[in-house]
Amino acid sequence: MKEIQLIFLISLGMILFSCETLVEPTLDDRQKDKSLNPQQFNYSTTKSIDVNIRAEDEDKEPLDQVYFEILKDDHLIATGQTNEEGILKNSISLPTYLDQVTIKTHYDEKIVSISKSEINYTYQSPKSTLSKSSGICCDGENDHEDDDEDGVPNCSDNFPHNPRCSNVLYYPSADQYATLAFEDKWPDKGDYDFNDLVLDYQFEIRYKQLLITEIKINFKVRASGARYNNGFGIEFPGLSNADIISVEGLQLSNDSYIELNSNGTEANQSNPVIIPFDNVYTLFENLTYVNTGYSEGHNLPDYEFSVMVDTKPVYWYEINYSFNFSPFMIIDGEREQEVHLAGGTPTDLGDQDPFYPDYKDENNMPWALNFPEKFYYPIERADIRNAYLHFEEWRTSEGNQYDDWYSNPTSGYRDEDLIYGL
Ligand SMILES: [Ca+2]
Ligand SMILES: [Ca+2]
Ligand SMILES: [Ca+2]
């Protein structure tokens, strides 16, 4: 208990030290009503969907190696081929507000509704265009050419010169980024502007026959609306350290407090953890209050980089990637001071007895939010509840109302004067 008090006092000291001009937020009276503070709600903006596709001919015989693409609107999410039973199974993560996807083959495309967290689709190919024996994936004489000899013909191989992979899954999509937004005054609430650390990310998961072999993560660090020197890590609870061959592209400072294993994962962790950066100052010219519109702050370009994780072939459903990756911020170089998404748990190197064990305060408010698309965060010192006018209804309805609160640009959804970049 003394330890907790000490940490609290140290944190309080850091808060006082770090934000002398900070105006304490006034809590809306409604938040004090327990009925409006759902215990179970973890602020998820996404839902996981199981995809079940079957390909058959006109006699309902299964067709293997039929190539499919899954898209949301025009944005590619995943590719894959049917197996010998004519089945393609997949697992994807979509915005909660989305209720349909587009499924494409080389020959056609169809809009398919999401029902009960599943997409079920049977594709029947006309005999005139496809046959099991003729290389069904595409037209022409070169259907069977397979340059990298991975068993997948070039025309259906997203990586025709890389035998380790043939298909890809993007999150949130091939041409979009997702956003993570953090408050760093843990365990105090702070000003609730969710811009103390903002970064966009995009997963490109490469696989072959549901075995993942390469994970590329593209990052754009957008804002550091803070005085703290924060870092960022990702835990992969679905993988084991032995699954990771190498990690390339980490942006660690010269005198980093992070200790690495020889494969590039963080040492002394039972689940694989990568630390894409340990020290946001080094990404932003050692400046503070970057890109949040603060009068004493600075405007700099986004800091872009990529991390490449090579893995031994890992069965898809063991990693279940986007539903089982756990991002966290490290506050001000204090390795044990981790801030996770609501409902998250500390890594082995985080404080094992955090002040708020599920990273939600007494009103069930979080310190971190995760968005399946680019999120325009509040300007410095603007409470997210004042910038986004339906955040509170979304929260108190446990996500049932206004699940597009962060993305809908229509009138009444947001106060653009309080949002950076609009
Ligand atoms: Ca191939
Ligand atoms: Ca290949
Ligand atoms: Ca801030």
Image (cartoon, rainbow, N blue to C red):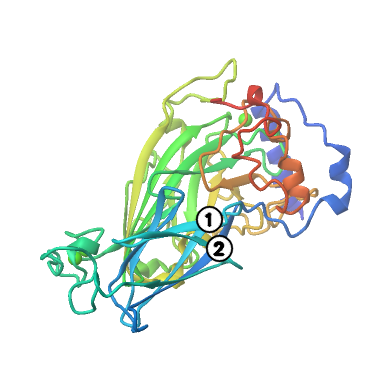
As measured in the structure, the alpha-carbon distance from the residue carrying label 2 to the one carrying label 1 is: 10 Å
Image region (quadrant) for ligand 3: top right
Q: Do the residues labelled 2 and 1 touch (CB within 8 Å)?
A: yes
Compare residues 299 and 118 and report the one nearer the observer: 118
Determine the secondary structure under disc 2. loop
* Left-right relation of 219 to 249: right
Q: What residue lies at 74% left-to-right and 48% top-to-bottom?
A: 395
Mark 2 or mark 1: whose residue is earlier in sequence: 1
Which residue lies at the image location 67% right of the left edge and 31% below the top edge?
Answer: 414
Q: Looking at the picture, does residue 185 appear above or below residue 173?
A: above
Label 1 sits on a secondary structure element that is strand
Locate residue 281, reporting x and y percent.
46, 31
Amino acid type at image mark 2: Ile
**Residue that label 1 marks:** 94
Q: What residue type is labelled 1?
A: Leu
* Snapshot quadrant of residue 385: top right
Q: Position of residue 210 (x, y in %)?
A: 36, 71
Image quarter of the N terminus: bottom right
Tell me: 191 left or right of 284.
right
The image quadrant that residue 9 belongs to is top right
Residue 114's disc is: 2
The image position of residue 108, as x and y in percent, is 34, 60
Q: Could you tell me which residue is drawn at 14 percent across and 67 percent down?
A: 146
Residue 325 visible in rendering:
no
Extreme residue in the front direction: 128
Q: Is residue 416 visible?
A: yes
